């Protein structure tokens, strides 16, 4: 009648793995989003970006790329 020999390191690691998986499952439920929610957010972001692009002024890029010193850089 000998008892089963158990490697304590392996038992501890297995126990920790189970606890970590349980915590991960709880977080997936708590913080996870459905596919529909992710798609809705992506659509809203795309609409916002198009709206911003539509309201940009023409010619703003020319001032930045002209090479003129506006006095805000180093050596000013």
Image (cartoon, grey):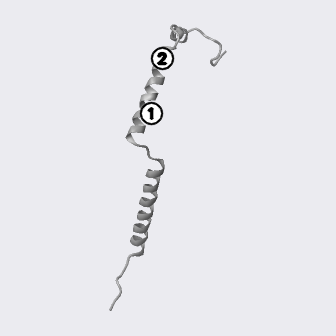
Q: Is residue 15 above or below residue 48?
A: below
Task: Name the one closer to the observer, 7 or 32.
Answer: 32
Where does the image place residue 40, in percent across and percent down from the top left? Answer: 42, 33
Crowd rating for badge 1 (residues with CA inside 10 Å; few <14, some 14–19, many 20+): few
Query: Which residue of the protein is positioned furthest toward the right in this rendering?
Result: 76
Sequence-earlier tag: 1 or 2:
1
What residue sits 41% from the left and 63% below the top? Answer: 17
Q: Quadrant of the C terminus?
A: top right
Task: Name the one closer to the observer, 37 or 76.
Answer: 37
Where does the image place residue 2, in percent across and percent down from the top left? Answer: 34, 89
For mark 2, what is the residue? Answer: 53
Q: Is residue 21 above or below residue 66?
A: below
Measure the C-alpha gap from mark 1 to mark 2: 18 Å
Which label number is shown at residue 41?
Answer: 1
Where does the image place residue 5, in percent across and percent down from the top left? Answer: 36, 81
What residue sits 32% from the left and 92% below the top? Answer: 1
Crowd rating for badge 2 (residues with CA inside 10 Å; few <14, some 14–19, many 20+): few
């Amino acid at each position: 009648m000998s008892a089963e020999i158990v490697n304590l390191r392996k038992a501890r690691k297995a126990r920790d793995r189970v606890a970590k998986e349980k915590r991960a499952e709880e977080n997936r439920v708590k913080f996870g989003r459905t596919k529909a929610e992710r798609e809705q957010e992506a659509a809203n972001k795309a609409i916002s970006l198009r709206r911003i692009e539509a309201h940009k002024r023409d010619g703003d890029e020319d001032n930045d790329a002209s090479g003129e010193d506006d006095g805000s850089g180093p050596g000013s």
